[in-house]
């Protein structure tokens, strides 16, 4: 049997005849139609609200939405528009583009996603991040375990602060040959990349596409709950690194124990690639990396509620040095950071603007997912069935120990994460329901966000509905069935750890 033909880095194999799970946009379009249809049979109802808009437990009562068929049809027609810039009427609570009141749509988050996408694209266009990781991998090539741990730590850090996932597809051409040259197999390379970034996303501290969107939908700061998520990130990243390193050492000692097997020419090509030294970091690259670190450092600093973190009191008065930024300021931060990086890299006016626009365009898809998901909540709001859904599960939540509630949030969101692999779309759809449930259970909304983030991140370590998993395995030339055999023990360990962390987090609140 001849070896498979070589493919260019980043090129995925054609598989036109295979079944492909619908995209998040298609799934949300179906969900929109389903929710619109269900609104005809689900009774309307509402809770009494506190001054800050939170529902009061035990106050649910039936109401009359007063919507004609034409009104409902108009709501369906305008659902995406309302999902972006719909305004909630302060008197009736209905959402429409021309109402007077507070913004209900996701315009703020929408722009924030585009700003972060533009910034990330500009940084990658400089070549600084690619070369920096390449230099790290080459420097540690003689110390295999340290190389695996170093690369996974970098990927995990990027995952927890900015959702580094699809961007990893560009690194297989570098990491696979290096791992093979060290005597490891292709599964080690795939695990290093997929599980490294995945562990960070699972414990997203300030990841704007997961924690940021979920916090916005839950009406809390992105910094709320960051201490718990930070502790989870340290533990989960350490456990994941230990898991991959243990497997890598076992394969190097006994090559026959490889779960991915060995392809013809693996060793020869790897040995040649492993001796090629990547180009040195230029002073310009170093400055760009420093500016990138400062940008994400500013993100973390600006959203942390320092007074609450340092005093342990949720109602502590903010310190003077706290910024308390939200999505408008963060969007501006990343637009400005993009300009700074473009200037430092000397990209030129045309090169910078083209890259900025291309970066924003590349992230329109997740932004549209957020918009569509928010449109679903608008349909539920205008039909007045959101509180009915809350009431249907209020009995199950009432009297539930706080620790058990966090675990329930984690478990309930696992199937949703399978159907909607987009973290931003999943968050926008689920959190308007989960956040008030947290109020009923007597736990913080931040804990619900953390449990949701863990569920979404855990599923995205293995589900075949994500391009990151299937595309990465294809580039590493590792079978999906073999990857599942490799990763399932780690998935079990991480699931137990998640439940333990959210239980302890609820207990210490």
Image: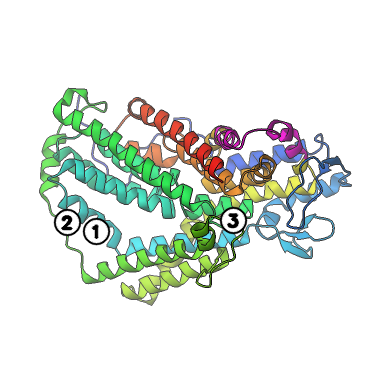
Pick the front one: 445 or 25: 445
Residue displayed at 27% across by 33% down: 187
**Labels 1 and 3: the sequence-earlier one:** 1
Foreground disc of the pair 1, 3: 3
**Labels 1 and 2: the sequence-earlier one:** 1
Label number found at residue 278: 2
Q: CA distance from mark 1 to mark 2?
A: 7 Å
Q: Is residue 282 left or right of residue 79?
A: left
Residue displayed at 82% across by 48% down: 48
Q: Secondary structure at mark 1?
A: helix
Q: Main secondary structure of the magenta part?
A: helix
Q: Secondary structure at mark 2?
A: loop
Q: Which residues are magenta?
A: 388-413
> Residue 505 placed where, x, y %?
52, 42
Q: Is residue 309 above or below residue 23?
A: below
Location of residue 260 by image quarter = top left
**Labels 2 and 3: the sequence-earlier one:** 2
> Residue 66 placed where, x, y %?
89, 47
Q: Is residue 395 above or below residue 49?
A: above
Q: CA distance from mark 2 to mark 3?
A: 49 Å
Pick the front one: 79 or 285: 285
Disc 1: which residue: 131
Residue displayed at 10% across by 44% down: 272
Disc 3: which residue: 314
């Amino acid at each position: 049997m001849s070896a498979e033909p070589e493919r260019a880095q980043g090129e995925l194999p054609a598989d036109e005849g295979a079944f492909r799970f619908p995209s998040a946009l298609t799934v949300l379009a179906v969900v929109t139609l389903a929710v619109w249809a269900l609104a005809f049979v689900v009774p309307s109802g509402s809770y009494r609200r506190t001054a800050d808009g939170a529902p009061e437990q035990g106050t649910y009562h039936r109401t009359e939405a007063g919507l004609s068929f034409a009104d409902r049809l108009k709501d369906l027609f305008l659902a995406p528009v309302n999902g972006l810039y719909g305004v909630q009427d302060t008197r009736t609570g209905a959402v429409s583009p021309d109402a007077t009141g507070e913004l209900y749509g996701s315009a703020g988050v929408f722009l924030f996603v585009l700003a972060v996408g533009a910034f990330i694209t500009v940084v990658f266009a400089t070549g600084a991040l690619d070369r920096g990781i390449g230099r790290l991998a080459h420097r540690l090539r003689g110390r295999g375990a340290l190389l695996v741990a170093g690369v996974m730590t970098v990927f995990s850090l990027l995952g927890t602060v900015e959702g580094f996932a699809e961007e990893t597809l560009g690194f297989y051409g570098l990491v696979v040959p290096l791992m093979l040259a060290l005597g490891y197999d292709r599964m080690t390379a795939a695990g290093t990349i997929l599980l490294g970034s995945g562990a960070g996303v699972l414990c997203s501290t300030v990841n704007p596409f997961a924690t940021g969107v979920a916090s916005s939908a839950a009406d809390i700061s992105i910094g709320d709950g960051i201490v718990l998520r930070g502790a989870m990130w340290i533990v989960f990243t350490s456990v994941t690194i230990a898991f991959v390193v243990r497997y890598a050492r076992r394969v190097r000692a006994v090559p026959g124990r490889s779960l991915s097997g060995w392809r013809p020419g693996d060793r020869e090509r790897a040995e040649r690639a492993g001796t090629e030294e990547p180009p040195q970091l230029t002073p310009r690259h170093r400055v760009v990396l420093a500016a990138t670190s400062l940008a994400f450092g500013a993100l973390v600093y600006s959203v942390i509620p320092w007074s609450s973190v340092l005093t342990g009191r949720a109602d502590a008065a903010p310190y003077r040095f706290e910024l308390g930024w939200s999505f408008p300021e963060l969007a501006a931060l990343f637009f400005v950071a993009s300009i700074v990086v473009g200037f430092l890299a000397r990209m030129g006016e045309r090169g910078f603007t083209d890259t900025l626009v291309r970066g924003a365009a590349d992230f329109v898809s997740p932004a549209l997912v957020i918009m569509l998901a928010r449109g679903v909540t608008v349909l539920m709001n205008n039909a007045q069935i959101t509180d009915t859904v809350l009431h249907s599960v209020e009995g199950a939540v009432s009297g539930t120990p706080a620790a058990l509630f966090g675990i329930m949030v984690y478990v309930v969101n696992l199937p949703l994460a399978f159907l909607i692999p987009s973290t931003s779309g999943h968050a926008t759809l689920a959190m308007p329901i989960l956040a008030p449930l947290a109020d009923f259970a007597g736990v913080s909304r931040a804990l619900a966000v953390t449990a949701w983030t863990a569920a979404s991140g855990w599923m995205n370590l293995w589900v075949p509905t994500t391009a990151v998993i299937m595309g990465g395995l294809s580039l590493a030339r590792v079978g999906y069935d073999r990857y599942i055999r490799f990763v399932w023990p780690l998935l079990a360990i991480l699931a137990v750890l998640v439940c333990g962390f959210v239980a302890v987090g609820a207990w210490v609140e």
